[in-house]
Image (cartoon, grey):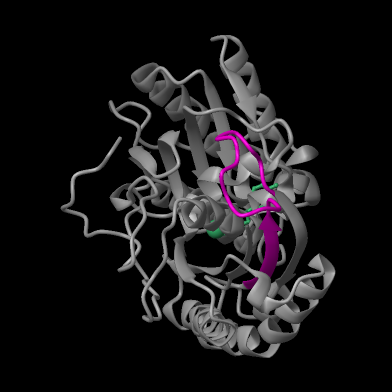
């Protein structure tokens, strides 16, 4: 079965085709292949505003999506009616942006007479590492760190997610972006701040490590952001080295917080491996500090390549493929949800109605 996947939850327009030849009945561990994949980032469009402008994002998805779908199908050498389904990000995300992908996906599926299925964006991130050849086996602890989310999730299998901790306010990527903006770096500033921090000296600026003194695995980054605002104001017209030192202090505070909470979550759930997902997962210092902390406990770490860490359609294709293989499909509805808790998902199950039962339904995990 092959699926076409569409992702438009925020400011990336993406489409992918993934599958295994044949019509089901594969070994449970069979890994589908990515046949075509394209991502277009709107970062330049939003840069002058210092953040994503939802209406501009939706309009740009409208402009780019249909030609991109045509290209990926052409690259995969497939036509619409040959697909086993069209899967699309149904949430969470910007509702106008989601509606573009959802309407295009549902309409194409209707026209081609193939099933459509709405997929949870975070399920895509949680499973993305399984696109790699050295795919992590279940169970694992996922540290999901993006511009919109900071979460620790125990992943027991497809659809078996237990949230162990999450941010009570800003996401880690958001804190990186806002601090980068105050330092005059271009949007989205996480990677630029990390580059500046490379020449910074550790210990010159000490930022708070939020919630480390309290039990549990939740995060809070808004206080850290306020501390960064005050420190940057105090810098005034300081030279490059002082700015680099500040960036280093900020990065160290975020990384130490993420690593300490991940270790705590590992101790709580006993998972044998950690998978890092989301755009902040590209951060080198986070990768090396986490790898050290995990190695000291005999825990393996998996980092999907940056292309699979940031928003993409390959991860949506994989999550949708697992569910289509199990026979899941939606009705004729176009599904777009701004909010959608990831732990309300269930293991894939055949259904002819809505793909995802309401939160109150007991799980299978
Ligand atoms: O997962 P993603 O592409 O989009 C969301 O779903 O949010 O993550 C984007 C976030 C941005 O906040 C960006 O600044 C951050 O990931 N980011 C980084 C790095 N590369 C990207 N943050 C810190 N260090 C990096 N190297
Ligand atoms: Zn994302």
Where residue 108 appears, x then y in whole percent?
A: 58, 83
Q: Decide if residue 290 is in sight here.
A: yes
Q: Is residue 79 left or right of residue 219?
A: right
Where residue 141 appears, x then y in whole percent?
A: 47, 30
Q: Magenta region's main secondary structure? A: loop
Q: Which of 334 and 342 lies nearest the eye of the viewer? A: 334
The quarter of the rendered structure image containing the N terminus is: bottom right
Q: Which of 44 and 243 lies nearest the eye of the viewer? A: 44
Q: Is residue 306 left or right of residue 351?
A: right
* Residue 205 magenta: no
Identified at 53% across, 84% down, the residue is: 100
Residue segment shown in magenta: 12-32
Identified at 59% across, 90% down, the residue is: 59
* Residue 210, quarter of picture: top left
Identified at 61% across, 80% down, the residue is: 49
Q: Which of 217 and 138 lies nearest the eye of the viewer? A: 138
Where residue 99 appears, x then y in whole percent?
A: 47, 82
Identified at 68% across, 57% down, the residue is: 18
Q: Decide if residue 145 is in sight here.
A: no
Where residue 365 appears, x then y in whole percent?
A: 30, 35
Q: Which of 340 and 280 lies nearest the eye of the viewer? A: 340
* Residue 24 magenta: yes
């Amino acid at each position: 079965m092959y699926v076409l996947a569409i992702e438009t939850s925020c400011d990336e327009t993406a489409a992918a085709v993934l599958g295994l030849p044949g019509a089901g009945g594969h070994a449970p561990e069979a890994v589908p292949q990515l046949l075509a994949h394209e991502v277009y980032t709107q970062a330049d469009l939003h840069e002058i505003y210092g953040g994503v402008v939802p209406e501009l994002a939706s309009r740009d998805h409208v402009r780019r999506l249909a030609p991109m779908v045509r290209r990926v199908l052409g690259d995969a050498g497939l036509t619409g009616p040959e697909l086993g389904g069209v899967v699309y990000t149904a949430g969470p995300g910007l509702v106008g942006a989601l509606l573009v992908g959802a309407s295009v996906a549902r309409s194409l599926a209707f026209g081609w007479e193939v099933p459509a299925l709405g997929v949870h964006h975070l399920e895509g991130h949680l499973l993305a590492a399984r696109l790699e050849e050295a795919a992590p086996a279940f169970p694992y602890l996922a540290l999901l760190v993006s511009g919109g989310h900071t979460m620790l999730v125990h992943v027991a299998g497809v659809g078996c997610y237990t949230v162990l901790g999450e941010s009570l306010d800003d996401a880690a990527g958001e804190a990186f972006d806002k601090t980068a903006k105050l330092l005059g770096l271009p949007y989205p500033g996480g990677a630029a701040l990390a580059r500046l921090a490379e020449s910074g000296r550790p210990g010159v600026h000490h930022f708070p490590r939020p919630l480390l003194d309290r039990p549990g695995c939740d995060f809070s980054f808004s206080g850290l952001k306020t501390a960064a605002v005050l420190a940057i104001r105090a810098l005034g017209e300081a030279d490059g080295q002082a700015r680099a030192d500040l960036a280093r202090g900020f990065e160290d505070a975020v990384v130490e917080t993420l690593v300490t909470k991940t270790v705590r979550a590992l101790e709580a759930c006993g998972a044998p491996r950690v998978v890092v997902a989301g755009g902040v997962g590209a951060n080198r210092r986070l990768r090396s500090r986490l790898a050290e902390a995990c190695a000291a406990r005999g825990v393996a770490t998996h980092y999907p390549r940056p292309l699979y860490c940031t928003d993409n359609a390959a991860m949506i294709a994989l999550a949708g493929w697992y569910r289509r293989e199990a026979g899941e499909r939606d009705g004729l509805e176009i599904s777009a949800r701004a909010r959608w808790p990831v732990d309300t998902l269930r293991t894939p199950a055949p259904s002819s109605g809505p793909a995802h039962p309401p939160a109150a339904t007991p799980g299978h995990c």
